[in-house]
Structure formats: structure tokens, C-alpha cells
Amino acid sequence: ELLSRKRDILNKEKQDELIKLLRKYQIKDISLLGSGTNRYAFKFHGYAIKFATDQDGRIDNLTEFKLAKYLYPHVIKIHEISKNGTLLVTEYIQPFDSFGEMQMHRDQIVKILQDLSSQYLIGDVGISSKNFRNWGKRLNSNAPVCLDFAYVYDVKSKLFVCSNCNQNSMLRSDETFTRLVCPNKDCRSVFLFEDIRRKISNKEHYDNIKNIEEDGYYM
């Protein structure tokens, strides 16, 4: 917790400090899985641990904890979370090794995202060379599973009203689920999920994950 609250060091430095702390307390059998913008992941005793390096990372952990039960089995199983959201314990699944491997499962991934899109849109998981490590497969299964789903939005949210036309048109995902397109034929504006994310304040994020005690238990 103290490490994630430090404001005077970069996230990369926090990740290095985390490794030092784990070694200091002789926590062994750790495999480093990699880092994102706001979180660092490692494997421990067959589980994946997502460590939040800042406030945004804690929101990501809390969001995945709250929504996993609604999105499973298309996403990893979430087991436990620390009270402040710094540590998230999840099912471990080997991510895809390449964009080519993701492409082999393209139709299945698109079908999953289409099925979920009646209620949710998920950012950073569409068919793109930037996103292949956000998907993997369970052992003895050929079905793809989403490993990182922190950017989940209600498809009916006002966030998806096109801001470039006056028709109140609701944006729709393109065929790859990497862009959002206005269906108004006189507009046809295109947005990225990053454009949507910039509109959301931390207060709105926390409103989305309130009453989280009802969705599970804390360590």
C-alpha cells in the first residue's frame, strides 16, 4: 500500500521496488509476467497477482473484481482483492505469444465481444497487434479468454453519445472492436476507446464500483 501511494517515483521504479520488497521478505517461486501503464503482474503458486502502482491501477483492479462474475467465463476468474484495491488475485492463463496467434482465434474473440456488446463495451481488447497479450486460452480448452478487462463500459452510457452531431446517435463498435463509429450517415465520426476514457473522472469510476462489498469479500 505504501509503495502504491508514493507520488515521487515513476511506475517503472515502483515495479522495481516491488521486486525488491518481495525478495526482502523471501517470497519465492515468483515469475514476472510484465507491466501495463498502471499495474504490474507476477505469477505466484499458480495464480496471477495484479499489483496496482497508482490510483488508476487500483480503480482497474476494483473494476475487474466487480465485473468478473458478470463476464465469466469469457474473462479470467477473480479470486480475491485487498481492501484498497492494490492487490488482485486472479486465475492464471498463459497469454497469446503473438498477434498471429490472436488472429487464429479472431472469429471466436469477435463473437465474444459481440455477445457482450448488448450490455458492455470493453476497451483495449479488440483485434489489434497492440492487444494480443490481453487474450489467452485455458488449459484443455480452445476458447479464448480475456485477461485484462479494466476498461468496461455500459453500452447505454451517455459516454457513447456522439459528440460531433446533434442527433444523439449512440456510437457502435467497428468490426474489429478497436474503434467506435457514429451510425448517423451525415456524421460517421470515428472515436477510439481512449477518447471515451478521457471523459471519465475518478469520481465516476468510483461511482461505478461502489458497494463492492456486495460482490465478494476482502482479504
Image (spheres, rainbow, N blue to C red):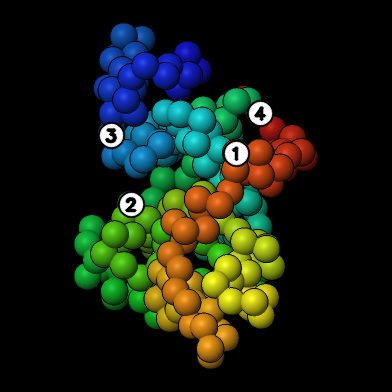
For marks 4 and 3 on the same chain, the one whose residue lies earlier in the sequence: 3
For marks 2 and 3 on the same chain, the one whose residue lies earlier in the sequence: 3
The quadrant in which residue 170 appears is bottom right
For marks 4 and 2 on the same chain, the one whose residue lies earlier in the sequence: 2
Numbered mark located on residue 202 in the image: 1
**Tag 2 residue:** 94
Amino acid type of the residue tagged 2 in the rendering: Gln
> Taking 188 as reference, is 101 above or below it?
above
Helix or strand or loop: what does disc 2 sit on?
loop
> Where does residue 181 sit, x and y in percent of width and height?
49, 77
> Taking 117 as reference, is 32 above or below it?
above
**Tag 3 residue:** 32
> Where does residue 194 sit, x and y in percent of width and height?
44, 56
**Tag 4 residue:** 218
CA distance for labels 4 and 3: 24 Å
Horizontal side, residue 155 vs residue 16: left or right: right
Horizontal side, residue 167 vs residue 48: left or right: right
Q: Are marks 4 and 2 in contact (CB under 8 Å)?
A: no
> Taking 75 as reference, is 83 above or below it?
above
Amino acid type of the residue tagged 1 in the rendering: Asn
